[in-house]
Amino acid sequence: MKTKLLITLFISIIATQMSFAHALWIETSSNGSLNKKHTVKVFYGEYAEQAIDPVDKWYSDVKDFDLYLISPSGTKTKLDKKSNIDHFESEFIPSENGTYTLSIVHGAKEPYETMRFEFSSVAFVTVGKGQATSTKAPFHLKPNNSNPKVGNDLEISVLNDGLGQKETEVIIMGPEGWTKTVHSDENGKISFKPLAVGKYIIEASKTEDKAEEWDGKKIEKIWRGSTLAIQVK
């Protein structure tokens, strides 16, 4: 009986760690053109392990996420999405100059004991020479460099409704499985120097105490994880 209890506990711990290790992220070009189709892709998996999950294996109901587009003038639109084997795909046609924001915030239906998980991701697309807009979005990451390059410092802000979030854990996942964990400073910023060309997935996470009912279950904590994909040249 004791052995069976230990095995059950071990499986529960592994399941929790797997949920934390997985992330949802948006991939798209950071530059767009007026009146030309712009493609967006959404993935889920363990990027640090170079593992992308098939859509039918995504955790809980994460595949039911909504993808929103916020235009430079502030118009918010829900985008249609198409399911592929290991990702979802969407598109939009920019009609004005400036910075477009793509955003996903999805609370997974299935909690673990008294904790629920909220997956989110953002991406920014600049069109023309329009001025960048300030978006008071929920917990997210924002790059402070528009065209990151190898060997140059890359600064990223951890924000929540426009305010910097200090002492937040941030995991930097680079090409070929390289990872580094840092914490944001007093102003909610982190900085690192990319040493290789390629795609970097940045994830900020935090756990909050919050008593609530979630899908008929009593919840005491919320784990929030937000990602940002960056292409370094």
Image (cartoon, helix red, strand yellow):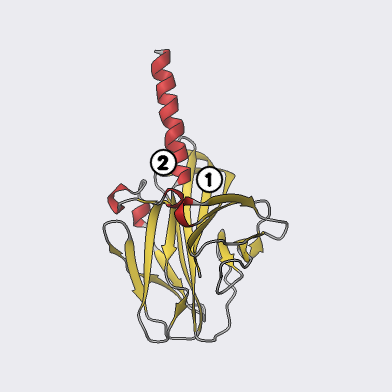
Residue behind mark 1: 222
Sequence-first disc among 2 and 1: 2
**Residue drawn at x 35%, y 50% as measured from the top left:** 61
- Residue 157 in the image: above or below residue 91: above
Q: Which kind of residue does numbered mark 2 sit on?
A: Gly
**Picture quadrant where residue 220 is located:** top right
Q: Is residue 220 left or right of residue 29?
A: right
Residue most extreme to the top: 1
Q: Disc 2 or disc 1, which is closer to the eye?
A: 1
Q: Which kind of residue does numbered mark 1 sit on?
A: Ile
- Residue 74 in the image: above or below residue 18: below
- Residue 82 in the image: above or below residue 50: below
**Residue drawn at x 73%, y 57% as measured from the top left:** 186
Return the x and y of residue 227 as percentages of the image width and height.
50, 58
**Picture quadrant where residue 15 is located:** top left
Q: Is residue 151 left or right of residue 200?
A: right
Return the x and y of residue 217 as percentages of the image width and height.
44, 39
Calculate the distance from the C-alpha at mark 2 to the C-alpha at mark 1: 15 Å
Mark 2 secondary-structure assignment: loop
Q: Are the residues at dot 2 and dot 1 in contact (C-beta closer than 8 Å)?
A: no
Q: Is residue 1 left or right of residue 86?
A: right
Q: Is residue 125 left or right of residue 109?
A: right
Return the x and y of residue 144 as percentages of the image width and height.
61, 70
Q: Specify the label residue 1 is tagged with.
A: none
- How many numbered callouts? 2
**Residue drawn at x 38%, y 61% as measured from the top left:** 42
Residue most extreme to the right: 186
Return the x and y of residue 55 as percentages of the image width and height.
30, 53
Q: Residues within 10 Å of mark 1 (few under 14, many from 20)?
A: many
Residue behind mark 2: 216
Q: Residues within 10 Å of mark 2 (few under 14, many from 20)?
A: few
Mark 1 secondary-structure assignment: strand
